Image (tube, grey):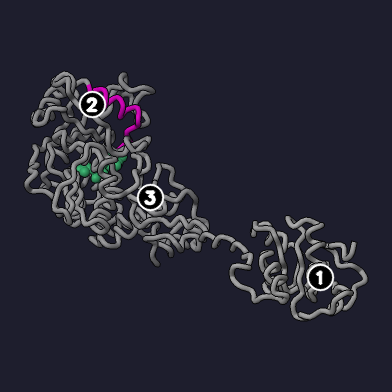
């Protein structure tokens, strides 16, 4: 066979390119066109036939694919496999070669000359898909768009930030306080531990100051700025005083300015009038400053559940707050109690308090009647307290009711402890909003409202969601409805530990 097709290694002995593969019967006419016919799909015999045909018409047809080839002709319509094969041939510059459908070849044979290459002749390389940008899981600046479990991988930083936040709060620098709380919240959401500050450069809510603190901690294992605050007498005293139930930053500040430094100072000070809440706060200080366990929260739940069902069979009771978010310990236990009959919730808390009192379980109760008025909605105040009926209680919890026993201080042999309990009682049609509002965390709630306002022109609080554009309230029977109204992915309660 004349000019057996060779695909692959260059024959050792080669004639000069000008002479290569030219039929002896015909002088090469078109010197700048050097054809290579691809055998794949075409088949050996057809390739041989076409080679002879072309050469007889004065075309140069190369036996091997080399850098001298200008026109590659193929019957392979699968451009991807053809190009993959071509790319494996180690040609110096594949872009200099025209890769053509056999139609160019047959047109040229018919015309007796190489016809100009048109788009229809080209077998184009399917460009590899534009490389997708690496999925940068951008962390949202809104806590309600982050999933934050109770597992905190960056506690060394977030504990430090909390000290600073509190310090600024005591000094009435709310902006700085919020900046540190926001930064802490972002770090809490990370599924990884920060090992160098460079790793945090794409994260939102981290500024110069927060980064400097992180650097300090990474370098020295602690922050000197934080330690200075922790050892600061005023800060320590304010923290001590505000740890008493019923004592806020203002009262603490007032006591400090009077020169009071300890509980005994306060209790011995003649001019000081403690309100009822503060008196109970001091009386039960040891118990209520000690964390409440999940088992204790469950036992409290049983007590409330029993009381509510004495009052109405249509009761609805839900654990909210930190325990609903999956926390193992809390500073109190929060519940929503209501009834399926709208309006019946009005007397519910009063009746529950009554029952608890009769059972001898009520150590303290501060009841606030409802001031809820739908016509006054929505509240424009940020983080405003809600207007539902609620009560702040201190309950006596018997050890026998708690699976695994009580959280007890060392040396404490009592068979009971005091526990802080909050109950809120919204009308049942406000249930979803109340549940979302009381589940927290505070940072999650704050950002839900901020997101609603800034991104959706909506106002959200514990009572309702108002669409300012449509000028209407949006109804919701579940938390999911509210997330849907806001166009947010649903975040499970246990992912709201922002
Ligand atoms: P908590 O202060 O009880 O916090 O308020 P928590 O998340 O349960 O954490 P610990 O473990 O007790 O410390 C629970 C949620 O209830 C809301 C708060 O905003 C918080 O998100 N809340 C509380 C109200 O909306 N109104 C209130 O009057 C009280
Ligand atoms: Mn709570």
Quarter of the rendered image showing ligand 1? top left
- Front one among 465 and 81: 81
Tell me where the magenta segment starts and ends, as one range: 289-305
Dot 1: element: strand
Placement of 221 over or under 353, stated as above or below: below
Residue displayed at 67% across by 70% down:
107
Placement of 425 over or under 141, stated as above or below: above
The image position of residue 123, as x and y in percent, is 63, 65
Earlier-in-chain disc, 2 versus 1: 1
- Front one among 52 and 182: 52
Q: Which residue is mark 1?
A: 62
Earlier-in-chain disc, 3 versus 2: 3
Q: Which residue is mark 2?
A: 396
Label 2–label 1 contact, CB within 8 A: no
Q: Quarter-wise, where is residue 66 in the image?
A: bottom right
Label 3–label 1 contact, CB within 8 A: no
Q: Quarter-wise, where is residue 294 in the image?
A: top left
- Front one among 339 and 265: 339
Label 3 – label 1 distance at C-alpha: 63 Å
């Amino acid at each position: 066979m004349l000019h057996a097709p060779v695909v692959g290694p260059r024959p050792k002995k080669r004639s000069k390119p000008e002479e290569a593969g030219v039929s002896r019967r015909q002088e090469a006419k078109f010197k700048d066109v050097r054809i290579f016919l691809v055998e794949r799909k075409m088949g050996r015999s057809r390739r041989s036939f076409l080679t002879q045909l072309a050469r007889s018409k004065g075309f140069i047809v190369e036996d091997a694919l080399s850098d001298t080839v200008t026109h590659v002709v193929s019957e392979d319509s699968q451009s991807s496999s053809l190009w993959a094969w071509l790319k494996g041939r180690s040609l110096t510059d594949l872009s200099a070669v025209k890769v053509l459908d056999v139609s160019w070849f047959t047109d040229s044979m018919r015309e007796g000359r190489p016809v100009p290459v048109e788009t229809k002749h080209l077998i184009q390389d399917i460009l590899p898909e534009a490389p997708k940008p690496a999925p940068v899981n951008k962390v949202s600046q809104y806590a309600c768009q982050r999933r934050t479990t109770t597992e905190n991988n960056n506690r060394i930083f977030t504990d430090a930030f909390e000290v600073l936040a509190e310090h600024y709060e005591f000094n009435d620098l709310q902006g700085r306080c919020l900046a540190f709380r926001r930064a802490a919240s972002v770090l809490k959401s990370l599924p990884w531990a920060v090992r160098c500050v460079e790793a945090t450069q794409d994260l939102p809510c981290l500024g110069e100051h927060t980064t400097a603190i992180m650097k300090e901690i990474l370098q020295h294992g602690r922050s000197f700025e934080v330690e200075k605050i922790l050892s600061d007498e005023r800060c320590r005293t304010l923290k001590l005083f505000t740890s008493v139930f019923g004592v806020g930053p203002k009262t603490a500040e007032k006591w400090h300015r009077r020169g009071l430094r300890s509980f005994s100072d306060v209790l011995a000070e003649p001019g000081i009038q403690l309100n009822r809440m503060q008196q109970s706060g001091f009386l039960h200080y040891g118990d209520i400053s000690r964390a409440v366990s999940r088992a204790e929260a469950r036992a409290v739940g049983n007590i409330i559940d029993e009381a509510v069902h004495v009052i109405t069979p249509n009761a609805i009771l839900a654990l909210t707050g930190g325990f609903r978010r999956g926390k193992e310990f809390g500073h109190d236990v929060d519940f929503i109690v209501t009834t399926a009959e709208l309006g019946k919730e009005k007397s519910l808390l009063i009746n529950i308090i009554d029952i608890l009192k009769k059972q001898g379980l009520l150590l303290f109760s501060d009841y606030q009647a409802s001031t809820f008025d739908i016509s006054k909605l929505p509240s424009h105040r940020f983080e405003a307290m809600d207007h539902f009926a609620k009560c702040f209680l201190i309950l006596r919890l018997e050890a026998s009711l708690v699976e695994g026993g009580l959280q007890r201080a060392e040396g404490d042999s009592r068979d009971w402890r005091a526990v802080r309990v909050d109950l809120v009682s919204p009308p049942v049609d406000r249930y979803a909003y109340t549940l979302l509002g009381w589940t927290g965390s505070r940072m999650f709630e704050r950002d839900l409202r901020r997101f609603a306002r800034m991104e959706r022109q909506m106002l959200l609080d514990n009572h309702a969601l108002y669409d300012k554009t449509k000028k209407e309230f949006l109804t919701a029977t579940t938390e999911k409805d509210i997330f849907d109204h806001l166009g947010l992915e649903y975040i499970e309660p246990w992912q709201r530990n922002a």
